[in-house]
Amino acid sequence: MSESQTELSIPELIESGGLHIFFQPIVSVRRKAVMGVEALMRGQHSQTGQLLTPKDLIQSALAQQVYPQLDRTTRNQALANFFQRGFHTQILLFLNLDLDLVCTDRQVQELIDRVRMMGIPPSSIVLEMVESQFDETERLKPCGQSVS
């Protein structure tokens, strides 16, 4: 991690509006049309102007023990942007979901509650499991299920 990343305060970045959501189109080859968008997180350091990758942001959030806050804020901002652009009536929103937070942070129920509160049809949301977390298939089992 670079020196400027260690000085990065994730709560300050969030508060200052330095966290940004971009939408990457997901295209159906069969339909020859955009069927959805994937929400992508990026950041910009308020003091240096340095662009921050998801890896930079996540590493800083983990080091500062504020990763759940970053994850929740990103997800809520993606939902808000998706709704404000009117996408919720036309296409799907693909959201990354961190497996480490699913069982410990009530993340799924919070997401469902937030989606309903915003008036977004739950059927418009597609959850993507963060691929870097699939180092073993045991992680794919539902929360609380015993391993055979």
Image (cartoon, rainbow, N blue to C red):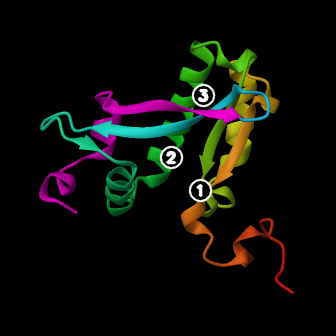
CA separation in Å, label 2 and label 3: 12 Å
Residue at 22% across, 38% down = 45
Q: Does residue 39 show up?
A: yes
Q: Return the residue at label 2.
A: 71
Amino acid type indicated by mark 2: Asp
Residue at 68% across, 40% down = 110
**Figure check: 86 above or below 121:** above
Q: Return the residue at label 3.
A: 79
Q: Secondary structure at mark 3?
A: helix
Amino acid type indicated by mark 1: Asp
Which label sits on residue 98?
A: 1
Q: Position of residue 142 (x, y in %)?
A: 80, 65
| Dot 2 or dot 3, earlier in sequence | 2
Q: On the rendered structure, is 125 left or right of 70?
A: right
Q: Position of residue 126 (x, y in %)?
A: 73, 40
| Dot 1 or dot 3, earlier in sequence | 3
Q: Which residue is at the front of the view, 41 or 69?
A: 41
CA separation in Å, label 2 and label 1: 8 Å
Residue 119: quarter of image: top right
| Dot 2 or dot 1, earlier in sequence | 2
Q: Secondary structure at mark 1?
A: loop
Q: Which residue is at the front of the view, 98 or 91?
A: 91
**Figure check: 144 above or below 98:** below
Question: Do the residues under discs 1 and 3 have CB atoms within 8 angstroms?
Answer: no
Q: Which residues are magenta?
A: 1-28
Q: Quadrant of the C terminus?
A: bottom right
How would you rate the neighbour count of disc 2 (Cα within 10 Å): few for under 14, some for 14-19, many for 20 or more?
some
**Figure check: 148 above or below 78:** below
